[in-house]
Structure formats: structure tokens, C-alpha cells
Image (spheres, helix red, strand yellow):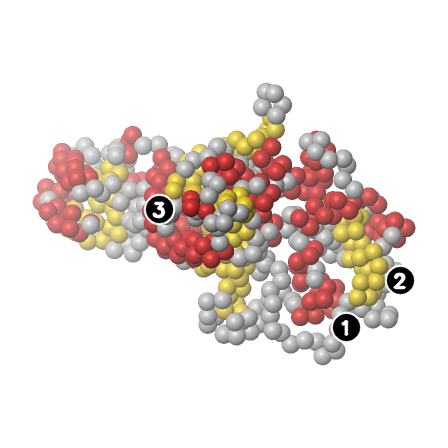
Amino acid sequence: MKQSKMFIPTLRDVPADAEIKSHQLLLRAGYMRQNAAGIYSYLPLAKRVLQKVEQIIREEMDAIGGAELLMPTLQPAELWYETKRWFNFGPELMRIKDRHARDFALGPTHEEVVTSLVRDEINSYKKLPLILYQIQTKFRDEARPRFGLLRGREFIMKDAYSFHTTKESLDEVYQDMVTAYSNIFRRCGLNYRAVIADSGAMGGKDTHEFMVLSDVGEDTIAFSDSSDFAANIEMAPVVVNYEKPEEELAPLEKVETIDQKTIAEVSQFLNVPKEKCLKSLLFKVDDEKYVLVVVRGDHEVNDVKVKNLLEAKKVELATPEETSELFKAEIGSIGPIGIRNDIEIIADVAVQYVVNGVCGANETNFHYIGVNPERDFQVSQYADLRFIQEGDPSPDGQGTIRFAKGIEVGHVFKLGTFYSESMKATYLDENGKTQPMIMGCYGIGVSRTVAAIVEQHHDEHGIIWPASVTPFDVHLIPINIKTDAQKILADQIYERLTNESLSVLYDDRMERPGVKFADADLLGFPIRITVGKKAEEGIVEIKLRKSGETFEVPVNDLVIKVK
Ligand code: ATP
Ligand code: MG
Ligand code: MG
Ligand code: MG
């Protein structure tokens, strides 16, 4: 490929609003351009990297028996009503109407579509298990699209779904997926860790995230310094064997659900409208101490949920109780922990609540999505749980907990029967009995992975692609293309390497050598071949991008050296 024919708009300066290295470098090196917040064009070089990463993913998915398909991005709202996710997904779901004013979602994920597909076509245990996957553009209206490809509103995902008759079969495929994911991220040259994740909004049980270790990661990983234990601290609660406070806290006893009059008091105290104080629970600590937990419905997710319920005319205006149930089902929001004048909160109890899932929800107007009251507020357990901290003994008894930042590049999930039950995806078992299929889902952020690779592979001069995902294997640079000897030799080298199935970007531009070399470092292919003054003697220079090592090579040895 001739560089003059490519579209590689490099920039000399660091783009103003790009905060992190991958974002800066992918813009500067002409790999991508922003179209709107969190929406990018992948330019030719990025497209080649994406293809490499996708090819690695395909090979590993195919190796465990995955069948690739491509499902539609546009998804009718009716499918999303079936799982209630139309109401529960919140503002991240991009919604549009067609000309008949029918509602559609731009797919943020494809559980509904794939479940409807499989339920219509598969009825017998004989056809299971089944693993389907696709690589496709996804849409999520992220609250804070940022960091370039790390958090986009339109991004590329590999999503896979598996369907089973038994839990054991799901376990097997889940393990296969973990192995496949490990292979994929290793082959992409990433330093990553598989961590125990939060099953939050999906209602799943077993789930792992694949985290690329990086200071710009938005997740915090708690890991043992001497075993394989690693967990996302978002996961709530993490059980640790910590030393209990000397004074044992008495178990909380629920004394009453606060009545409307008290709700009015609470709303006044918290300065939120009465109808938004959905549920208040008063717990007794001992004869003198009480703790009040207020479930508030003023989270934007919840407002949208209620609004959509109404719009869809599926239900009447949800009562506070119904809304509270919706909370529990998918998206929870609890907070703040209120204190009435006549109720004292003992600090420890408040802290227990905070660490036990709320994570700061008692700050004014601060809420967490994905908090599940039933899971995160098991009052009877409060005294045994707290959020894991650095320096704690590892829960597996081996070593000490350390924290690190991670970028979530992959996520594997045992879904169970949530989707198959709500969407009636059933099969007939050996005895002719109808059973819901047991499901798993498995995602990889393909475009995010590309950014994560750049985060881990760059220096002050530019990107340093691992050989497995580089857009070109070789950057071929004649110093002066106008010199016959250089041009003839460069042409020969180009042909020879191309015949050896190496991909070569041939810098045929009329630029100064300094510009070409700086661009080559910025673009970041593993091998640079410079054809210069010694062209007449048939000698060229090889430079390895990663180590900076250079050596002269006779052209006849080139193929062996480069391969
Ligand atoms: P995050 O916690 O970063 O918001 P998520 O848990 O919401 O991600 P999943 O629903 O698990 O994401 O989707 C599967 C994969 O898709 C993620 O592991 C991640 O690699 C990728 N992904 C999710 N959201 C984005 C995004 N906004 N931009 C790029 N990739 C994303
Ligand atoms: Mg997300
Ligand atoms: Mg996540
Ligand atoms: Mg996830």
C-alpha cells in the first residue's frame, strides 16, 4: 500500500480535549476523527487494526464452537417490553421512532433479539447447547462519553450468547469463554486480569470482567498480591474476614415501615418532594439507636423509567410501591441515609450501610445505578460485611489485598433464565416437558480494546503496535524517492515482502526524512525499513519500533530478518 494513497491525517499538536494517551495518539496519528461526542470515524489505519482484533476474536470464538451471525441494530420496542428493559434500561438506551411513530431501540446489547430468534427456531433439547456471536456496532447514550474509544456512544462490540439445557452445560461454555477471552487478550498483547464482577443490573450470578491494567481505567480492582484472587470493588458486597469492632453491633431489627405522615417529615428533612420518597425503613439498633433508610425515586433513570411506562401506555402511573419494585428488579437507587432529629445514627451502622453497597449514596444527590436493595441491604448481614480495602487479607486466605485501576475490555455472564422466562424461550426436554433455556452472555469491547492496547503500548514518540494487531507489519521508507537507486530498491523490497504475505506501507511521499521518520514513530508499526544512501550497495537499515534498535542488512537477507 502506498502511503500517498492512504488517508492518514496526522496532527503535530496534541488535540486540546484529548486527556489520555490512547485518545491523543489515535487522533494525532490519523487513526480516527470525532464526529460527535463519543462517536468516531475509524480511518483506514484504525480499520486495519480493528480487523486484526476481530480476526483474533473470530478465531477464538470459532474454536469453542461459536457460530457467527449478524443481528439488526434496530430493535422493536415490543421485544424490550417483554423483558421490561424498555423501562428499566434508563437513558443509556437510544430510542427512535419510525415514520409510523413506532418505537425502536438502537441496540446497546442483543439479549432480546437473540432470545426471540432462538425461541422461534429451537424447540428441542437435541439442538442445544448453542453459541451464537456477532461483531457489531452498539449504541449507548453514555452520561459521560469520554476518553476517545474507551467510552463511546457508538462503539464496536463482540457479543456472544449461549443457550443450554443444564447448568453444567452453561458452566462448561462459561469456562470455555474464559479461556477464549484469555487467549484473545493475550494475543492482543495486553496485560490483563480476569476479575470477579458485579452482577448488578443483569440479575446474573457468576460473572467475570476482563480488566486491562491501566491508570486511566475507570474501575478499581482489588487483587491479592500472592494468589489469583481479583475482584472489581464495584462488586457489592465483598466479604472479608476483617476484625470486627470490639463492641459487637447488635443486629438491626426492622421496627416499622414509615407511614405517610412520616414520609412527609422525611421529605421535608431531605428537601425532596414527598412523592419521591418511595420507601422509608426504620431499623432498630438497640433501645436508643435507630437507623432510617430512605429509598428515593428522584434518580433520573427512574424518572425516565416512569415516563416511559406512561408513554408506552403499558401501565398506569406507577405507585411508589410499584416503582420501588422496579428498583429492585433492575436498577436500584438508594439514598441518602436520612437522619431525623430524634433518631441518632451510630456512625458504624451508617458506614456499614455505605460500604455494603451504597458506596457514598448518602452524599447529597449522589446515587448509584445498579444497587439492589435485596442484595445490598441484607440487614442481618451488615455486621459481617464491609467493602474490601487495601491491606486487607485476601478473602481466599492467600496474601494481602492491593488495588489497581483497570479498563473493562470484556465481560462474561451467567444469565440463568431471566431472558428465557420473560420471553418464553423454552424447549422440550427428554421427557417432553417444557423448560426454559439457561443462558449466558459474553461481551468484548472491540473498539475499547484497540484503545486499551494503545494505552499499554506507546512511548513519547507514538504508538508501538504489538505485531499481532499492527495495521502494517513494515513501514518502508525510501529517504528520497526521486533517487533512482532508492526507488528501484524500495520497489523491489515492497514486492518481495508483499509476496511473503507481509503487509507493507510504502512511504512514497515527497517529504523530508525527518517528517517521514517522525510519522513512522507516531504510526507505530513494529518494523521500519529505510532505503538510503547505501541503496546502490543493496544495503538497507532496519529499525525496530519497540527497542529503537537499528541495524544494516543486505537486501538478500531482508526477508529472513523481517519474518
Ligand atoms: P462499563 O462498565 O465500562 O460502562 P459495561 O459493563 O456497561 O461497561 P457491558 O454491558 O459489560 O459494558 O458490555 C460489554 C463490553 O462492551 C464491556 O466489557 C466493554 O468492553 C464494552 N463497552 C461497554 N460500554 C462501552 C462504551 N461506552 N464504549 C466502548 N466500549 C464499551
Ligand atoms: Mg456501562
Ligand atoms: Mg461495567
Ligand atoms: Mg460489563
Depicted 203 relative to depicted 157: above or below: below
Q: CA distance from mark 3 to mark 2?
A: 64 Å
Q: Which residue is mark 1?
A: 250
Element type where label 2 sits in the image = loop
Residue 295 in the image: state x and y as whole percent: 76, 52
Frontmost of labels 3 and 1 is 3
Q: What is the C-alpha distance between the residues marked 3 and 1?
A: 55 Å
Residue 241 located left or right of residue 485:
right
Q: Are marks 3 and 2 in contact (CB under 8 Å)?
A: no
Mark number displayed over residue 342:
2
Residue 405 visible in image: no
> Is there a contact, CB below 8 Å, between mark 2 and mark 1?
no
Residue at 31% x, 54% y: name it.
Answer: 546
Give the distance between the C-alpha atoms of the residues marked 2 and 1, in whole angstroms.
20 Å
Left or right of residue 98, residue 350 in this image: right
Image quarter hosting the N terminus: top left
